[in-house]
Amino acid sequence: MGYLLESMRKLVLLLFFISYGFIGYAQSADSLELAQTKKTLLRKLDNKDLSPDNRIKDLHELGKLYFGEENDSAYYYLNSALGLAKLANDSLQITKSYVSLSLVGIYTDDYDSALPYIDSTLIYAQKENPEYYSSLGWVYSIEGMVFNNYEKMDLAFEKILLANRYLEKAPENEESHEYLTDNYNDLSIIYFNIDNYANAEKYAKVALQKAKEIESAYYMAQNYNMLGTIYNAKDEYGLAERYLDSASTKYEEADDEEGKISITSDLGYLYRNQGLPTQARRQFLNSLSLSKVLDDPYTMVNSYLDLANSYLETNELNRSKAYLDSAQQSVITMSIPSYEGYMAILRAQIYEKENNIEAGITELKEVLEKTETNSFQQSKADMYGVVSRLYKEKGDYRNSLAYFERYSELRDTLQRTLQNEKLNILRVEQNYNQLVSELEQTESSLKLANIEKQQITTRNYLMIGIALLTILFSVFIFFRQRKLNRARRAILNSNQEVLKLKKEALDTEMRFKNKQITEFAIHISEKNELLEKIKSKLKGIKVTNDTYKEMVHEALHFINGDIEQNKEKVQLYQHIDETTDSFGAKIDQLYPNLSAKEKKVAIMLRLGQTSKQIGLQLNISPASVDNYRYNLRKKMEIPKGQSLKSFVQNL
């Protein structure tokens, strides 16, 4: 389950990277159409009569078409647009050029190169001019993505909140609306990564509504995907499947291949969570096929690993090893060290199932000794945990303890880091809300200052009078309410005490009656045993005289009738015992997974009966009673050292 959630997080981060308008455009465009668009723009730029403003815009568009390509064409055309904008002293176009240049570094995973362009954007942008709000919101979103890559979640969150502030106030147009939709999706991702699913769901739904307003299939798909991922993490599988199906439909409509890969993987995790390995593998195979078509190494490796793990869970080790070997080959070929830890864990688990524990330990220790492993602390902690468990299975408790201590120390460090990130994000959110509130109050005060100059004295007196009346009224209400609350609490406490005493008396009486019924039932069972012995003796008597034979037959018939009546009485007393004791209802509520026999054994243990007495009542052997006692300890999760009888009596 831990790997499933981690895999979902990776897919969420993939959404983070592809959720921007420019990038989405570059990824979804058909290659032939893209080439044709480039030629058209180049022909327009060859026109010497093209105005400087249109030339800057066309250079912008041309530069964005080269996003993701290994050559420097994107930088060349965007820097050309920047140079012309500076010559024209057009600060708005300068700002847009710097925003686009920062995106080039993001798309090529060169996050360090994006920061100088972000700083330049903030220098040229006029923060009080609404025309710049869209670019400001966009660049703060990009800066948030940079900090997210550096795993500085609090700073990423702060920048995305700033972006939201500007985008909410930006002039209404399709571009600003798309930016705002992206930004709400980014907020959802940040909250998801710190396990705050409530806010993640809230902002994903806001982003979905924004996407519907502009009728964008791509953005609707993106947010349906996000909601499906959130509900999957919350184990709300019905909702998750519904949203993922909607996302799949919208990705098909938008012809977004990256989105299709994301959806098939997410559906695979959903089915695996529900214990449906066949359906899960079908989705992982679809994801693998799409990844091969796109020649996307990262999603290809993810698909191989998902399939390897799926077959490992069902002990199909040969298939698991085959997919794991494929993933290993891809990782070696493309030099992707981030997957080595998880692959080592999978391989060690395969060795474990093959009873080759030593090979599993060796595999994990070799990866742990690599310096690259230090960059992936969660993976390192997981490997420590598996090595500790394997040493324990091997019987080497000293090494098991040593690796468990390393695992515990690293796990605690990671948990503290995550907790600090959560606290920092909450602090940032609080500071942001306070800042926004203060800014709104300041803006409101400035707008109303001139209007209220002549009325300020009268208004102040009126406000003071209202405040005094409000204070007096509040004090009166406070003391009156406190008095009422005290009286209500006193009555409530008295009623609760009476109810408690009545319940205790009733429980005592019921326990006494149940004990009497049980003892009587045991007496009847013992009587039945005696009658069975007498019946056996009578059957063993050889009678030749017909008269005596008839008498023996009648005696046997009488004994059989008496035994049947006794059995019916025992069943009746058991039924009375079960239906009159409130403990039965309580144990049904607390432990619904107990069988009927286990519940009966628990009730009889509460009455202080021994295994022999319970066996007589239930017509089973004492050994069977002991088996039921073992099952009860396991299902009730009773700690070692505490007796089952005392645990049940204290419920």
Image: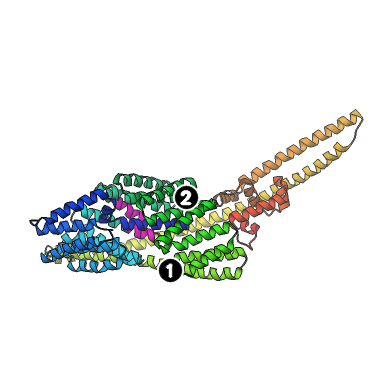
613 or 312: which is nearer to us?
A: 312
Disc 2 residue type? Arg
The residue furthest left is 49
Disc 1 residue type? Glu
Q: Residue at x 68, y 41 (%)?
A: 571
* Mark 1 vs 2, N-terminal side: 2
352 or 266: which is nearer to us?
A: 352
What's the magenta region?
187-209
Q: Residue at x 58, y 70 (%)?
A: 399
**Numbered-mark total:** 2
Q: Residues within 10 Å of mark 1 (few under 14, many from 20)?
A: few
Q: Main secondary structure of the magenta part?
A: helix
The quadrant of the image that shows the C terminus is bottom right
Q: In the figure, is residue 251 to the left or right of 633?
A: left
Q: In the figure, is residue 358 to the left or right of 490?
A: right
266 or 154: which is nearer to us?
A: 266
Mark number, residue 272: 2
Q: Which residue is mark 1?
A: 372
| Residue 627 picture location, percent across and down | 67, 52
